[in-house]
Amino acid sequence: MKAILTPQRSDNVMNVSAKGDVLTIEVDGVNDSFDFSTLNNGDIAVDFVSVLNPNPVLSAKKESEEIIVELIGFYDSEAEETETITREVILNG
């Protein structure tokens, strides 16, 4: 799974992990999981219902058998410059 992190200044603390097509996110101690296994190639999903506040999941799509999620990438006032730019990360192999 690939994540594109769109930076946003926030004091929220977020941890992200993925296993297969399931993305698990923790924001400020609250967890939620997002199962993208039903996406077919070319599908795009938006408007996710979640217990997370704020919900950092903006969209998900499947291209060439790979799940690509767009997330808000929270960063605090002491963030490294690399955290303040849009970046791509691989969440699992």
Image (tube, rainbow, N blue to C red):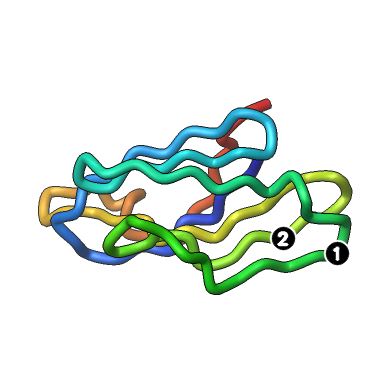
Q: Residue at x 42, y 39 (%)?
A: 16
| Residue identified by numbered label 2 | 61
**Marks 1 and 2 close (CB-CB < 8 Å):** yes
Q: Residue at x 49, y 43 (%)?
A: 33
Q: Is residue 47 above or below residue 92?
A: below
Q: Tag on residue 62?
A: none
Q: Quadrant of the N terminus?
A: top right
Estimate the x, y position of residue 56 in percent, counting from the top left.
40, 60
Marks 1 and 2 sit apart, C-alpha to C-alpha, by 7 Å
Estimate the x, y position of residue 12 in percent, counting from the top left.
19, 54
Neighbor class of circle 2 (other Cα within 10 Å; few <14, some 14-19, many 20+) is: some
| Residue identified by numbered label 1 | 42
Q: Residue at x 68, y 39 (%)?
A: 21
Q: Quadrant of the C terminus?
A: top right
Q: Earlier in the sequence, mark 1 or mark 2?
A: 1
Q: Residue at x 55, y 33 (%)?
A: 18
* SS under mark 1: loop
